[in-house]
Image: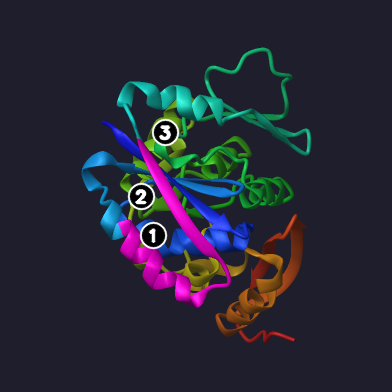
């Protein structure tokens, strides 16, 4: 399949503006984004791309922001895709405990947990601050024997890590993006934990009540706030929820939404301007202080 690489120049550039542009244009059919100051690069199948639709969408949105955008685009032939993402994927190590790498990386030092992924169109390589925070947060939890939900699983980095940490089977991995679902399944096999994962295409509507001890959700603020009650319902009393995909300045909004859903604030970790919030499901009769 051939893709169009769209480079949106954001002036002035910052990550918050890049996130706003993603929210504006992702419904046009983009399958992945790569922030690269001063650009936001987006990738969309050639058959789905319309320069006019993109221009119209950006023009209609820009009146709401304090920044401006221009864009240019070029075609990437299918046979060149692997070389593109390989050039953007360096191995990472989180707290000297977890290495996230691709199959073509060689000669890396061994850590306690080693995860090999093929991000395909998802660019879910662990390099984003929120994935780094979630990996770190998960490694700080007692996971062995716990039932785990990975909501918005992407390339399944967190699901695979939970499996390697001894979570009970099956770990439920859910994503609304069919490409992410395929990638999660393949990466489960690549890391020899596929028998421990059940990957579903869908959203929070498929969750059952009281099913999990640990809920992981690295999505974005709006989805988390909209769905946090369903996440809470799926969590057992005194279960743990780790949430990221939002900025530190938004942590109070997340904590408030959690309190309304029967979740107590436990802690917050940060990396650059991004945050991870840890919440705990209240026991029956317990109230948020």
Does residue 233 appear in this view?
Answer: no
Residue situated in front as seen by the camera: 13 or 246 = 13
- Dividing the picture into quadrants, the one containing residue 205 is bottom left
Name the front one of labels 3 and 2: 2
Residue wearing tag 1: 25
Q: CA distance from mark 3 to mark 2?
A: 13 Å
In the displayed structure, does residue 108 sit left or right of residue 23? right
Q: Position of residue 177 (x, y in %)?
A: 35, 50
Whether pointer 2 and pointer 1 mark residues with C-beta atoms closer than 8 Å, the reply is: yes
Q: What residue appears at the point 75 percent right and 65 percent down from the top-left corner?
A: 268
In the depicted structure, whether residue 251 falls above or below residue 114: below
Q: Nearer the viewer, mark 3 or mark 1?
A: 1
Determine if residue 220 is in view. Answer: yes
Which tag, 3 or 1, sits closer to the chain's start? 1
Q: Quadrant of the C terminus?
A: bottom right
The answer to which image quadrant residue 189 occupies is: top left
Q: Is residue 260 above or below residue 33?
A: below
């Amino acid at each position: 399949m051939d893709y169009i690489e769209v480079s949106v120049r954001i002036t002035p550039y910052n990550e918050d503006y890049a996130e706003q542009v993603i929210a504006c244009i992702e419904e046009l059919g983009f399958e992945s984004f790569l922030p690269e100051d001063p650009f936001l690069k987006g990738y969309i199948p050639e058959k789905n791309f319309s320069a006019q639709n993109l221009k119209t969408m950006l023009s209609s949105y820009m009146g709401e922001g304090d920044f401006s955008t221009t864009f240019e685009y070029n075609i990437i032939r299918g046979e060149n895709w692997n070389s593109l993402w390989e050039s953007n994927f360096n191995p990472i190590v989180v707290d000297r405990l977890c290495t996230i790498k691709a199959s073509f990386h060689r000669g890396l030092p061994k850590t306690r947990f080693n995860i090999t992924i093929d991000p395909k169109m998802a660019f879910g390589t662990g390099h984003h601050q929120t994935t780094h925070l979630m990996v770190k947060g998960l490694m700080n939890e007692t996971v062995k024997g716990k039932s785990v939900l990975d909501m918005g699983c992407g390339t399944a980095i967190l699901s695979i890590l939970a499996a390697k940490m001894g979570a009970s089977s099956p770990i439920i991995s859910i994503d609304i993006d069919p490409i992410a679902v395929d990638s999660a399944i393949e990466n489960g096999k690549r890391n020899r934990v596929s028998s421990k994962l059940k990957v579903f295409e869908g959203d929070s509507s498929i969750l059952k009540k009281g099913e999990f001890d640990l809920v992981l959700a690295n999505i974005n603020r709006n989805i988390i706030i909209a769905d946090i009650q369903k996440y809470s319902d799926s969590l057992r009393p005194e279960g743990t929820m780790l949430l990221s995909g939002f900025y530190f300045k938004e942590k109070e909004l997340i904590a408030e939404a959690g309190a309304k859903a029967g979740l107590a604030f436990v802690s917050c970790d940060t990396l650059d301007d991004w945050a991870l919030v840890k919440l705990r499901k209240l026991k029956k009769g317990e109230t948020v202080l």
